[in-house]
Every structure is written in structure tokens, then in C-alpha cells.
Image: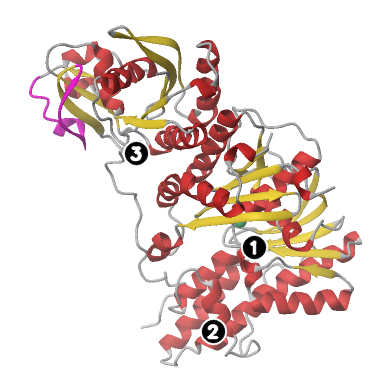
Amino acid sequence: MLLLAFDTASPAVTAAVCEPVGDGVRVRASVSSVDARRHGELLAPGIQEVVERSGAQMADLTHIAVGIGPGPYTGLRVGLATAHALAEALGIACHGVATLDAIAFASGRTTPFVAASDARRKEVFWARYDDALTRVGDIAVDRPADVDTGGLPVIGHGAHLYADVFGQDAAQAEPLYPDAAALGELAVRRLVEGRELPEPLPLYLRRPDAQEPGAPKKVRQWQA
Amino acid sequence: MSNTDLPLILGIESSCDETGVGLVRGCELLSDEVASSVDQHARFGGVVPEVASRAHLEAMTPTVQRALDRAGVKLSDVDAIAVTAGPGLAGALLVGVSAAKAYALALGKPLYGVNHLVGHVAVDQLEHGPLPKPTVALLVSGGHTSLLLVRDLATDVRLLGDTVDDAAGEAYDKVARLLDLPYPGGPPIDRAAREGDPGSIRFPRGKWGDGTYDFSFSGLKTAVARWVEDAERDGRPVPVPDVAAAFQEAVVDVLTRKAVDACREHGVEHMVISGGVAANSRLRALAEERCAAAGIELRVPRPRLCTDNGAMIAALGAEVVAAGLPPSRLDLATDTSLPVNRPLAG
Ligand SMILES: [Zn+2]
């Protein structure tokens, strides 16, 4: 198994090549940069770089794992469109990993916590975890003040942005963003364990903003 | 030289609400598949960018697969990938460009980020063969109203004029709403107008005879709105066919007049009309009449090729490859307002 992982559902653009080794996972190469406005420019060169640095060819890849968000939609779709097309062109399996799960996994925490990412519009995407590998329930989108943290520590960029709401523990919010090395490691572990991964489909969690038009605006005041 | 000696170009288009994928060799069209999200936008009276972007992501790889199947080729047969880099909606463009980069990377084939507007002109080659040089091109659709001087599709395209406000197709959509006709407004207005008298109402011709090749349709739209409101206020029934015909006449009169003037001024004997509004029957008829009178050969691609599609992007890609231009880099950026004088985005 040689797995290409990447995620564009946060301000970070990150890619990695991973493989199972013994009981663990080896990350052959990884790259990350934070630039919320250049996902479309950075991802493909990043993938090319990690595949080259891992000493492999594109044709050697056997699996793709892509972050499915939730996260800002334009960036999120860069990763998913790339994953779908790569998987089709290479004829290999493509799986999804919730971006928040990758952040939680990278925290390495062994006790309960909350992970939160920036959902824009003064809201966060968030979920509760029993430990780094175990999410409790679904991911939700809420205003920070409405998140029921149960007094648990909060990690992720959402914790960092809303430190005033989430309190002291937000100072230990690391990791802020997903890292494809962790995302890939999580995906390899699950696949080796024979567990199902989500479909590579976006977690939007919100309907598109669109307003149905009212009556055409009058261009002239009617005389009474 | 047989056609199979020419490179096989995969074209991907996602600048607005159509996910288009085409396969082309030179001037030969092998397939042209489109998945449209137009029905999802109808109740909003215009394209909703986020709705369009979501639909592009869902439709992209299935549409590529359909295009390959229809052409009877495999992805590994593709020699180069062309994709719309702009102009268009930011989020929508990004889906197509991301997919195109992934195909290029996986297949180890060159990527060409090309100009949507020039693609509308290049597509005519798939129906009528190589474009005469030079040609004046009139692009009219819901998103654009531009007059171009095309000396070479890959390397020499000049903008002569553009709309200063609404695109022609946008004016159709807005007037259709005023007349309680469905979205998109072009076809229903065209149909209604056939029953009406274009001379019954005289609507203003924006920028008529102003010495430029620019267009304006905002004043026309307002004039139609006023006319309809006045009729309603006075309790007169609105003669929809007459209003539609008079509105349509005002649009196509300015479009064709300026296009013919551009041919005359630049000594050009060929004209192409493309874009969604090129399917309009009155535009075609008046353009034919005026071009014939001026000794200009007119080419209008069939309606299916005039609307946004992937074949037009593949057709331009084929030109760019044939011209020997360097491929785009993998860090190619989308450009929502890519100027028309850059057929290849870089
Ligand atoms: Zn167009």
C-alpha cells in the first residue's frame, strides 16, 4: 500500500505519501503551507513534490485519502476535485477522512476534548472526542458561545480564534490545522484494520446561501 | 495527414453553470458532454455561485467518463488537457482547474489553462473548419457581450468592445422576469417575439452611434420596465409579444450594427457569432441580412456549440498546442477576469 493524503479544508494546504510498516505507518514525505487564498495553486505542485520526494511515481500510488472537511467550501472543493480526478486517472481507491478527525488524531490526546475549526461567519465546526482516535457523535456547526464543551479542553484553529469564548485551555490549541502526514497515517491505520473510511464527498453542513427574488423592483414611483 | 496524427485534446469547462467536457483532434469533434445545473438556479432568477460550484464537483468525473465513452477513447489516449482558467466564477473555475491539474499530473500530460471567451470563437472550427484570418467575433451570452478582432486564435485576439453594464443575455433574463416569462429568458422571449410587432414600441438603443464598439443594455431594461409599469398603472393589458419583439429588436439591432461596423473599419470579411444568445432567431436573421449586404461571410455554430461546453475549450487547446505555446505550470491560478487578449492564461 502506498497512500497519497491531502487536505485543503482549512487555511493549510498539505500533502503526504504514507505506507504501512510493521505495526505502524511510515510517512515517506510531506509538505504543508498555510495560505488560505492559494489552495488551487499550491495543491497540485505539493502533490507532485511529495510523490517525487517519496521516491515513487504517480503510478505507484495505490490509495488516496482526502480531507472531506468540513471547511471553507472553495478550498475544500480543490482537494475533492483533485482526489476524484487523480483516482479516476490512476484507477485507484479514493477515501475520505473528516478534516476535524485528522486534527484530533494529530493531537495525540488520550483524554476527552473538543476539536473546533473556523467555519467563518463567526461560527465553528466542532466535535467531541473521547481520545485522539475516537469521535463522539457528529460534527456540528455553531457559534462558539453555543458550543457545549462540557468544560473539556478545546483544540484547533477554532479554539485559537475564539480563545475568549473557549477559555484558558485554548492556549494549548495545537494543532491548529490538519497535517496530511497525520491524515494519511490515520487513513492507513484504518485501512489496515479493515475499517471503513467515509466516501470522498464534501461535508458542507450548510445549505448554499441563495435568496429567491421578490417581485421586480419598480423603476418609477407610482402616482397614487 | 490523417486526423489520428493530431493530438487528442481533453477540454474541461466549469466557468459558470455548465460542467462541460469535450474531446477534440484538430478541428474534429469527438465528443461533447455537458452536465448543467441551470434547473437548480431557475427559482433564483440567475446563477447562484455556490450552487454551481457544488454541482461542478459532483458532475466533473462522471462527465469526463461520459465524454471518453462517447468518443471511444481512454484517458491514457489523451495527449493534452485544456481547461478554462477564466474569466468566470471563482469557485466554479477552481473545480475544473483542480480536476484538470490532477488529470495532467496523473497522466503525465501537458496542461493548458485557456480563455473561455476565445473558446467561444474557437468552437466554430469544429463545425465550419479553420477560422478565416482575420475574423470579427461577436460573443453574446448571459455572461458576456464582447466584440473581438481575431487574427490568430492562439496568439492574437483583441478586444474591440464590451458591455459597460449588463450582458445581453442578462438583459433577456431580466426582461423575461418583467413579462412573467421563465428563466433563462432568451428562448421564451425569442418565441414570444415571433408573434409580436418589433416596430410597435421604440425602445432605446444604448450607445448607438457613439463611435465605440461598447454596448449597454441597462437603460434598455429600465425602459422596458417603465413601459410595463405604465401599462399596468393605466390598467392596459401588457402585449407581451410586442414588448418582447421590440426589446429583442433593440438588442440585436445594436449588436449586429456594431459588429458589421467593426468588420468595415478593420477591413475584415468574416464574422463569427457565438455564445448562448447566438441561438436567438432574430439575431441570426438580422446578422445574415446585414452581413450579406456588407459582403461579409457569417458563421454561426449550431446552438449546442454556442452555449458553454468543453469542446470549445478543447478546440482552443488544440490551437494552442498547434501553435507550439508552452504548457501552463501546475501552479496555474484561475483568473475571474482573464482578459481576452490572453488566449492562453499562462
Ligand atoms: Zn460563455
CB at mark 2 closer than 8 A to ligand 1? no
With B265 as the anchor, is A210 left or right in this view? left
Q: How many marks?
A: 3
With A176 as the anchor, is B346 left or right in this view? right
**Magenta region, residue range:** A132-151
Q: Chain of mark 1?
A: B
Q: Residues within 10 Å of mark 1 (few under 14, many from 20)?
A: many
- Residue B276 shows up from this direction: yes
Q: Residue furthest top?
A: A22
User: For the residues marked 1 and 3, what is the alpha-carbon distance in whole angstroms?
Assistant: 32 Å
Mark 3: which secondary structure?
loop
The amino acid pointed to by label 1 is Cys
Residue where numbered disc 3 is placed: A202
Residue A208 at what x, y percent from top left? 34, 49
Rendering quarter of residue A32: top left
Residue B261 at what x, y percent from top left? 83, 67
Residue where numbered disc 1 is placed: B306
User: For the residues marked 1 and 2, what is the alpha-carbon distance in whole angstroms?
Assistant: 22 Å
Residue where numbered disc 2 is placed: B192
Which residue is at 55% across, 51% downward? B69
Q: Residue furthest bottom?
A: B236
Determine if the magenta segment contains residue B81: no
The quadrant the C terminus of chain A occupies is bottom left
The amino acid pointed to by label 2 is Ala
User: For the residues marked 3 and 2, what is the alpha-carbon distance in whole angstroms?
Assistant: 42 Å
Residue A40 at what x, y percent from top left? 51, 32
